[in-house]
Amino acid sequence: MADSDRAPVIVGAAQLSQRAEDPCEAREPLLLMEEALRAAAEDAGAPRLLAEADSIRVTQGLWEYPDPSRWLAERFGAARAESVLGMISGTTVQSMLSDAAAAIAGGERDVVLLVGAEAEHSKRRAKRAGAVPKRTTLPHAKPDRTFGVPVQWRDNPDIAAGLRTPAQAFALFEVALRHRRGEDVAAHRARIGALWARLAESAARNPNAWVRRAPDAEEIATPSPENRWVAYPYTKLLVANMVVDQAAALILCSAEAARRAGVPEQRFVYPLAATEAVVARHLSERIGFDQEPPMGIAGPRALELAEVEAGSLDFVDLYSCFPAAVQLGAESLGLSEDRPLSVTGGLTFAGGPFNSYVMHAIATLVGRLREEPGATGLISSVGGFFSKHAFGIYASRPPEQPFRHEDLADAVRALPARSVAPDHVGPACIESYTVAHDPGTAARAIVALRTDADERSWATSEDPELVEWLESEDACGERVRVREDRGLRRAPR
């Protein structure tokens, strides 16, 4: 049995949503953070833990507060708390929690507060009404610590290739997966629609979900005026929804500190193990788009560290920014796509508050684990253009060993890479593609190619006939010709 006093335990978890009738009266993210943390302390039955915090960790949002953790510390009277701001990535919540759990197990911390919040829905409504959303002005002090590495966009071959959004990047994986599975366009659209419809059903049962009406597979996968194309083959109902007003908070502490604060042990949820891996290569250098080998390293290793079999997991929440992430995540863990793969309903329906969805996933999992003593659950997270991965294993039973955490960047770095030929002109073969449907602009195909030397290159096209071809057939494997202007034309048959 692990040292019971130093075992990190989640003792408080809370989520909230606001739907202000008047967006100008909506609470700003800072106030939502405070409310969520106070609710998490009430959930633990130990409000005193807020003042005892020695670290307060906030995930960077769409807001511009320079050091929200310091403001929260002052509100709670947590005079000795370090202030931490997590950089933008879908993996930041899990990474900050893993770091906190390791620090608690090692005796460096006792009580850590984690929180994230967005008020993007009310902000956009207020701006449409010509109003300026209320925001507290904080001193321009830097936090004691920033967590994570900012994304570097300069000299990025993916951006140079024409990729602008995560939806476009993940769509490349989606199309390549479709081709590997041998599906035609209609069968693939029906399958990912059904996958997302199952998430929508989960969201309908989740009282904290943002969208609870459970659209069916056909509505989800079929483009319409209300469900426009975003990046083929993804419609609006197949992508993450960050236009929400939501907050979530967690309180993590040592079992000793929890007992001292009077938290009943049946409220304890134990982080067992975690892994993370930053993929150092750009998409252009990935060996292929029909697989994600870093997931196949980080996911199984987290289970191995926790001494848990994938088939024995009671609960799973795979990061669901786009269907490709769920499919490849399930594949990496050997899980069937037919089993429940989200405890919340996912980022489209439960809500994807920019940088802090995983806070909601863990908070939801905490409640489920408490309801089933002895149960285990897995949370996955993804960041960037499939450039970061993190996995966490949690249980409502005391662990047999101390919390275990591994950074697998070296193992991921050792994976093979593909050479890039950015200036290739001439014949090539289509590897994958998407069509960007940015509002107010012409549909733009972004095509990943393999040259005859098996290098990767890129091309783009706004030719309506070529766009129609790509969206109506599986064009992977087809021969094309790249022009000097980076345009594309089909090779004659």
Image (cartoon, rainbow, N blue to C red):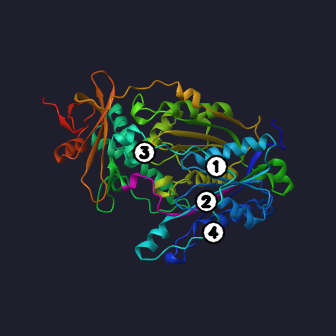
x 65%, y 47%: residue: 96
**In this figure, which residue is indicated by the disc labeled 3?**
323
Q: Please name which of the two marks, 4 or 1, marks the residue nearer to the observer.
A: 1
x 48%, y 67%: residue: 121
Mark 4 or 1, nearer chain start: 4
Q: CA distance from mark 4 to mark 2?
A: 15 Å
Residue nearer the viewer, 366 or 274: 274
Mark 3 or 1, nearer chain start: 1
Q: Is residue 245 magenta?
A: yes
Q: CA distance from mark 4 to mark 1?
A: 21 Å
**In this figure, which residue is indicated by the disc labeled 1?**
146
Q: What range of the chain is rendered magenta?
A: 236-250
What x and y, as percent, mark residue 187? 31, 42
* Amino acid beneath label 4: Leu
Q: Is residue 465 left or right of residue 81?
A: left
* Amino acid beneath label 3: Pro
The residue carrying pointer 1 sits among few (fewer than 14), some (14 to 19) or many (20 or more) residues within 10 Å by Cα, namely some
Kindly state the secondary structure of the residue where label 1 is placed: strand
Kindly state the secondary structure of the residue where label 2 is placed: loop
Q: Is residue 42 above or below residue 82?
A: below
**In this figure, which residue is indicated by the disc labeled 2?**
66
Residue nearer the viewer, 66 or 218: 66
The residue carrying pointer 2 sits among few (fewer than 14), some (14 to 19) or many (20 or more) residues within 10 Å by Cα, namely some
Mark 3 or 4, nearer chain start: 4
**In this figure, which residue is indicated by the disc labeled 4?**
31
- Quarter of the image for residue 33 reads bottom right
